[in-house]
Amino acid sequence: MIDIQLTGLVKEFEVGKRILDGFSLQVEEGERVGLLGKNGAGKTTVFRILTGQVSEDEGTVSVAPGKRLGLISQIPVYPEGYTVRDVLDTAFERLHDMEAELNELAAKMGEGHDSEVLARYDKLTAAFEAGGGYDTETRLNKVCNGLAIDADMRERQFADLSGGEKTRINLARLILEDTDILLLDEPTNHLDLNATEWLEGYLDRFKGTVIAISHDRWFLDRVVKRVAEIVDGKAELYSGNYSFFVEEKERRYQERLRQYEKEQAKIAQLENAAENLRLWAFKGMDKTYKRAKSMEKRIERLRTTDRPTKEKKLTVRFGEKEFHGDEAMVVTDLAKSFGERTLFSHIDLEVAGGERIALLGDNGTGKSTFLKILMEEEAPDSGSVYFGPSIRIGYLPQIIRFDRPDRNLVDTMLWAQNCSTQEARDRLAAFKFRGEDVFKPVSALSGGEQSRLRLCMLMDHRINLLILDEPTNHLDIDSREWIEEAVEEYSGNLLFVSHDRYFIEKFADRIWMLEDGKISDFRGSYTEFRAFRERQEQLKNAKTAPEPDRPREDRPKRPGGTKELEKQVRAAERAVEKAEIRLDEISGEMDEAASDYLKLQELYEERGRLEDELAHLYAEWEKLAAELEEAKG
């Protein structure tokens, strides 16, 4: 069954500038579609047309009858005084109305017997139960726990929340409404890693249809099964997740480039032949003149193909200062509180040269504050931070500020970088600020553009410790990949805060997890860190699993005595060791297959199976070891 049918959509907001120019997309029931495109390509316009916020200039829009659409970026206006709990309760309005009618019917039934009232009551009771009327509190708590909406937040005034918090509450409301078709516009922008992973799990179980606009590539890989990219106002379709899209898009580009080069070679051949025919025509051969004209028309038809293009790669790199010494940074007994709330305490860390560290943690745990202490923008309550004598820091904060936002881009570069006008324009051009854009005031730039300008200025400095706070926030996928090119070529120390798991996986070889006021230190990639945490959780669950409490003498004896138990413990140890060795081998194979998407997927699947098996083996080994110890005692 088709849930959404968009055919030949045309939309322009300025005369002659079409955002959508023949956009067509068909979405089947239950599909997961990623809607991609550069900023300004028309992604949000498609959503606004679907929800009726704007109307199309041409084309047709069809949504399956009876299907309810929910748009996450659309935050309704609620009455004054509404708390977060009140907003979440609006998801159950239909059930509340049914409950009110049931109460009225029950009162009527108490006054006397009426078969029609009784029939209506029975029918409404069944509908109320089927709609989850008796489980609303349980559902609300599950969704709120997953999206980190605690009891205190539920009592706050909705109007007092930040834009990100309102978006999170609206997402929870849409989920609770059990909408048939979810339109998600950057759903992970204001979610921490735990909440994002919870959302991915929810969408995996969701039975309805999902169309997602997102710059979170990991999220797209986990959630979507098909990609529609908006290019020049039209949809280019790809039957796979984001990683497949990247690979297939490059294949299509190379195919178009080969076809273009083949046509150009054919044009050159035909032009040479036409020139010879014209020469013969001058010698009185009339038929060759007609053939030459015919050939020229054929050449013109071939010339209609434009050379395929794609984004140019970054041509500038960070200026780097050589690192000397054993320690790049030492943090000793660091602590920071705000009022009665302790962010962290007793933090001790050491960083050697060349390490790349991701600082992770839920929103509000103090990650940005930790970086600000390193940059001496905040003072710690106690403890100290030491940097090696050769360390030179480059810092990209989460919120970019400029001393003079009224200055244009060229003047900003001239004042900050002490360079010539031509040098300023050349460097700005390398960072995609070209033409009249360089004369815009800095205040007119978007958040992503301001990050790009700050990075442009930062690259002029010779540094060996780069500190980034949410470097990919507000950036589209092209800009994220573009910044990754710059970071990839940089070989010095890197410390960054990010919720972009694609970025974390690509660059981190060490993970600092800030939680419960402490920083746990894990040496390895993000994928290895997640696997480690999952194993810890499985072992914890296995240890805390309740066992029947019965007297020792009533427990069944294991046949074979202690010798048989010792044999089984050794076998379990060998099985664990074998699985651990294979896990290490897979990590190496994944590094080698980094550019081979299909092989990488196979390795991910094998590792997942092996981690599940290892958790079972650990539990079995612990159980056997405990039995052996008891038998010997």
Image: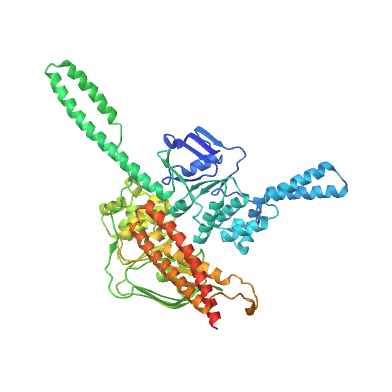
Residue 156 visible, this angle: no
Q: Position of residue 377 (x, y in %)?
A: 42, 69
| Residue ID at (65%, 58%) | 138
Seen from the viewer's position, the closer of residues 546 and 323 is 546
Q: Quadrant of the C terminus?
A: bottom right
In this picture, residue 526 sits left or right of residue 263: right
Instruction: Say how the picture is coloured.
Output: rainbow
Q: Quadrant of the N terminus?
A: top right
Q: Is residue 92 above or below residue 141?
A: above
Task: Name the outermost residue toward the bottom.
Answer: 633
Q: Position of residue 524 (x, y in %)?
A: 39, 67
Q: Is residue 463 above or below residue 267?
A: below
Residue 483 visible, this angle: yes
In this picture, residue 175 sits left or right of residue 492: right
Seen from the viewer's position, the closer of residues 426 and 394 is 394
Number of labels in the image equals 0
| Residue ID at (37%, 45%) | 248
Q: Position of residue 462 (x, y in %)?
A: 28, 64
In this picture, residue 399 sits left or right of residue 426: right
Where residue 591 sits, quadrant-wise, is bottom left
Task: Name the outermost residue toward the left.
Answer: 283
Q: Position of residue 597 (x, y in %)?
A: 38, 52
Task: Name the outermost residue toward the right.
Answer: 112
Q: Is residue 295 above or below residue 76?
A: above
| Residue ID at (20%, 32%) | 268
Task: Name the outermost residue toward the front.
Answer: 560
